[in-house]
Image: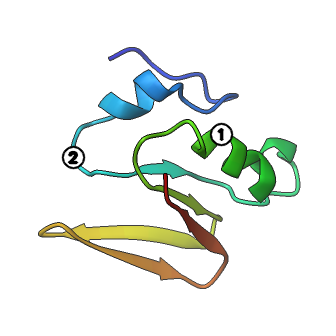
Amino acid sequence: MGAVDAGRPPTVREADRALGLVDFTLYPHLNHPEMEDTELSNIQRWASGIPVPTYAIDDNTAIKVVDGKVDVISEGDWKLINP
């Protein structure tokens, strides 16, 4: 798999094959003040083309997956966007 440009979210094709370990995609840096593309409305628009759930998470949030069970660990903001 080729590298994904850090300045843009992955395309649907790239997101579909990202690692192949979980059945969701991740959009980091939710509402980061120096990254206007990370506003929730922009992430929701991007996620509308993704066929799996999308977790939009800020820099105070992590995702833990154990035996297929997803846990969001957060002291910040996050949103699960379903397809």
Kindly identify the residue that appears in the image at 26 percent across and 51 percent down.
22
The foreground one among 61 and 39 is 39
Q: Quadrant of the N terminus?
A: top left
**Is any atom of residue 39 visible in this view?**
no
Residue count near mark 2 (Cα–Cα under 10 Å), binned few <14, some 14–19, many ≥20: few
Q: Is residue 48 left or right of residue 73?
A: right
Front residue of 33/51: it is 51
Which amino acid, mark 2?
A: Leu
Residue nearest the viewer, comparing 82 with 33: 82
Q: Which residue is mark 1?
A: 46
Q: Secondary structure at mark 1?
A: helix
Task: Return the x and y of residue 62 as percentages of the image width and height.
Answer: 47, 69
Q: Mark 1 or mark 2, which is nearer the start of the sequence?
A: 2
Foreground tag (2 vs 1): 1
Q: Which residue is mark 2?
A: 21
CA gap between label 2 and label 1 equals 21 Å
Q: Horizontal and vertical percent for residue 64? A: 32, 70
Left or right of residue 20, residue 16 in this image: right
**Quadrant location of residue 3?**
top left
Question: At x 42% / y 25%, what residue is drawn?
Answer: 14
Q: Residue at x 65, y 65 (%)?
A: 58
- The amino acid beneath tag 1 is Trp
Determine crowd level at label 1: few under 14, some 14-19, many 20+ residues with C-alpha closer than 10 A. some
